[in-house]
Image: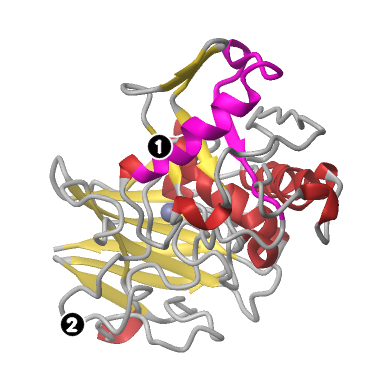
Amino acid sequence: MDFPNKRGPDSQHPEPSFYYDLLARDGLEVFREISYGKLRLEVELFDQWFTMPRDDGDYRMERVISPERHRAYMQDAMDVSCGVVDYSQFDILYIVPVHGSAVPFSPTMVGKDRPLSCASGEIGLAVTFGADMYSRKGKLFAHENGHILGLPDLYTYEVTAGAADGFSHCGTWDLMGWIEGLAPDYMAYSKWRLGWIEDGQVACAAADGEFTLTPVETEEGLKLVMIPLDEYHGYAVEYRKPIGLDKALPEEGLLFYRLDGTVCGGLGCLTIIPPEEEQYLRLDRSAPDGLLHPGQTASRDGVTVTALGGGRVRVTRR
Ligand SMILES: [Zn+2]
């Protein structure tokens, strides 16, 4: 999209294909890694500029935006493109503003119960990209589409009691938590929810046991040990290695984390338990905090996990 006061052909990036490459081409490559090639998502570029009826600043696309203002922006984008785009043929709408627009961030609308519509069809899933796309690129695409697939934010919107900051729960370990993190691959639990890790690749530690995990970044083998407590709470263990999307990691190790099904996204539904009774992950975002190294132990709620080297783990339950 461009705007009466900021026209695409006069901009720093006048070719719409630039934005497709930045977000979709890069993002589909990120998803190919995350999903082991199992996600089928086709993104079509409409290779022209659609001009919004109002200047960019008039939409007031701020960091925190009301659903109504967000909808008004998306509705204008649909209306000016409705004659060209057959919306009955698409599930998701990606709205990308011209470079230099006053659109700072990239919220997602997941609203199939209350879709937007124009003469050619309805849309209940949409991402309105903003200026954070220039640094976050395909990982931003994979974060926002993660919401469309049903995943929650794993950073917290407010700092929870006793936590160091909004990244204390998930740290650097999932791009649904920290997009620019060292290890942006999805947590194994999220991949299982999405069907990219199959039930046969998940072990249940209903009692004490030893298991040998394979790295989350590769497709084959055991990926996740689930340690259920009750219907809504449990723990999980996975193995992360500096390969694939996580290649920037300086070391490998196990992650032990708590899952809370009574807490919504952005409020701490997944919490990594660091070794040796450190209470939360540290603030230092340059180091991969939270890993269990061989011989290290972490415990919560009567569940104790010991790293035995490589992907091997011992689970003991009180
Ligand atoms: Zn998000």
When asked about the image quadrant of residue 40, the answer is: top right
* Mark 1 sits near ligand 1, with its Cβ under 8 Å away: no
Between residues 304 and 152, which one lies in front from this camera angle? Answer: 152
Tell me the amino acid under the disc marked 2.
Gly
- Using the image, tell me which numbered label, if any, was put on residue 214: none
* Mark 2 sits near ligand 1, with its Cβ under 8 Å away: no
Ligand 1 image-quadrant field: bottom left
Could you classify mark 2 by the number of other residues whose Cα lies within 10 Å: few (under 14), some (14-19), or many (20 or more)? Answer: few
Location of mark 2 (residue): 162
Image coordinates of residue 194 in percent, x first then y, are 47, 35
Q: Is residue 284 left or right of residue 54?
A: left
Q: Residue at x 51, y 47 (%)?
A: 144
Q: Earlier in the sequence, mark 1 or mark 2?
A: 1
Scheme of image coloration: secondary structure
Q: Residue at x 62, y 47 (%)?
A: 34
Q: Is residue 228 left or right of residue 257?
A: left
Q: Is residue 32 left or right of residue 318?
A: right
Q: Residue at x 14, y 40 (%)?
A: 231
Q: Does the segment drawn in magenta span residue 252?
A: no
Location of mark 1 (residue): 71
Q: Is residue 260 left or right of residue 282?
A: left
Q: Residue at x 46, y 44 (%)?
A: 108
Picture quarter with the C terminus: bottom left
Q: Which residues are magenta?
A: 69-98
